[in-house]
Amino acid sequence: MTRSIDRRRLLTSAALGAAGVVAGSAFGSFSPEEAFAAEPTPAIDAGMPDPNFAEGLIRSIDDDVISALGSDGTLWRIRVTSGTSVWKLTPTTFDKVSVGDGMYARGAILDDGTIAADSVWANIVNLKAHVVSISDNKLHLDHNDERVIGHVVPGTTAAVYNGTPAVSDVSMVRIDSHVQVLGAWLPGTNEVEISTVYAAA
């Protein structure tokens, strides 16, 4: 029987990892892969939050402003503009972002405390996991003793084997192997739609 997952805790820990909120300054790139690979801005002291980065669960959306409750209790207001890049498994538009989504945003803080977002990522996760089993278009994963179902999305999911260029064929992912999965949570579940899976061939 699958255990319930504290999605807010897992989403935050999986996406940001041990680097904590300071890693939010790395999210200047729109691509999730590049965002996770980037280095934090040196001007921010280690262990200190980046004031131009926000994370949390979306509580409301009012026109072009997102209100989100951060994992540390901070209430964030994020303003989305015509220049804001939005990601939710794939590059998308702001109308696809919903109340209940987990959100990361990067931008510039305004005088009223609102962040004018350059980029918004909805439900983004970065999981290191063990492949327990494989079924039709699903990878059954163990992440820190939590069971996660990874959905292969035809036409979207890519696989990277041993650092080679990404391909759409995920058939070389093996049971009992260790993988890294970039993707988007399905809110309220222990399921992830896979953007990219990194594996050994």
Image: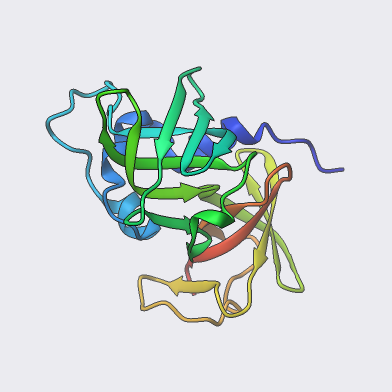
Taking the view exactly as shown, the residue that stands out farthest to the left is 43
Q: Residue at x 39, y 71 (%)?
A: 162
Q: Where's residue 44, x and y in %?
A: 18, 27
Determine whether 40 is above or below 113 in the image. below
Left/right of residue 53 with respect to residue 160 in the rendered view: left
Frontmost residue, 106 versus 38: 106
Q: Where's residue 108, x and y in %?
A: 25, 37
Determine whether 78 is above or below 120 in the image. above
Q: Residue at x 35, y 60 (%)?
A: 31
Taking the view exactly as shown, the residue that stands out farthest to the top is 73
Q: Residue at x 39, y 41 (%)?
A: 105
**Quarter location, residue 47:** top left
Q: Where's residue 193, x and y in %?
A: 62, 60
Q: Residue at x 71, y 46 (%)?
A: 190
Determine whether 94 is above or below 2 in the image. below
> Which image quadrant: the N terminus?
top right
Frontmost residue, 194 versus 175: 194
